[in-house]
Amino acid sequence: MSEYYQIAVDGPSGSGKSTLAKGVAKKLGILYLDTGAMYRACGLKALKSGIGTKDKDAVEKMMQDIRIDITHEDGSQHVWLDGEDVSSDIRTPEVSMAASDVSAIPCVREAMVDLQRKISEGKNVILDGRDIGSKVFPNAKYKFFLVASAEERARRRLLELQEKGNTEVTYEEVLSDIEKRDLQDSTRAASPLVKVDDAIEIDTTKIDIEETQDLLLSYIKE
Ligand code: DC
């Protein structure tokens, strides 16, 4: 067995995975890898290239000539697409949907999973995503599956967007996007979002981020 360990945090959009994983990484002094950001970079490239985000052939061609790099500065992850820092450009509702679209295409998943394993090599790491416990690291030492009601997740996502200055988007739009992505991410053929049997489920609907973090850490200490 490897001397390093992985913590897998999976769950649907807005369940609180990234804030939680980031906080736990800081507390434990380990690497945090936001895998959704990688699919978002692929989605952004498809949008920029003007190709259909569900067009398998065009996306496959695009993936032959894509460069995604991940760097970390003061605990914050930066995502680089073809040499450009796109860390904030990938946080729009349009890119969220594009990421969900391209993430259903097997060659995109293969490339991103390879990259995630490569970055995690020789390190203790906490990763958040949809397929970490099922596909990327099926032997992860700890596996968590976060859930929350769609309404609560939409409320959080809206707040996040508003804090970033996006005041045009409405609650109804955010909720509809979340429901659409939930369906698409959990029904795709390639590595769908699924709770594996050995994952611990945490419902974050009624608990805040600090309580969620304490709960997760209590399982790790056990
Ligand atoms: O976690 P996120 O919202 O940033 O992810 C954006 C999209 O990327 C999500 O709708 C599905 C996809 N994704 C995935 O398929 N597998 C992952 N490990 C992470 C994200």
Image (tube, rainbow, N blue to C red):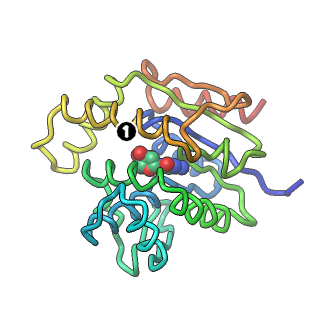
- Name the image quarter holding residue 161: top left
| The one of 21 and 187 positioned closer to us in this rendering | 187
Q: Position of residue 219 (x, y in %)?
A: 71, 30
Q: Quadrant of the C terminus?
A: top right
Q: Which residue has dot 1 on it?
A: 181
- Looking at numbered disc 1 in the image, what kind of residue is underneath it? Arg
Above or below, 14 relative to 82 = above
Q: Is residue 197 left or right of residue 161?
A: right
Q: Is mark 1 within 8 Å of ligand 1?
A: yes
Image location (x, y in percent) of residue 27: 60, 47
User: Hey, which residue is sitting farthest left in the picture?
Assistant: 168
Give the residue displayed 52% in from the left and 22% down from the top: 203
Secondary structure of the residue carrying numbered label 1: helix
Q: Is residue 198 left or right of residue 70?
A: right
Q: Is residue 149 above or below residue 162?
A: above
**In the picture, residue 172 is in which quadrant?**
top left
Residue found 50% across the figure and 67% down from its top: 72
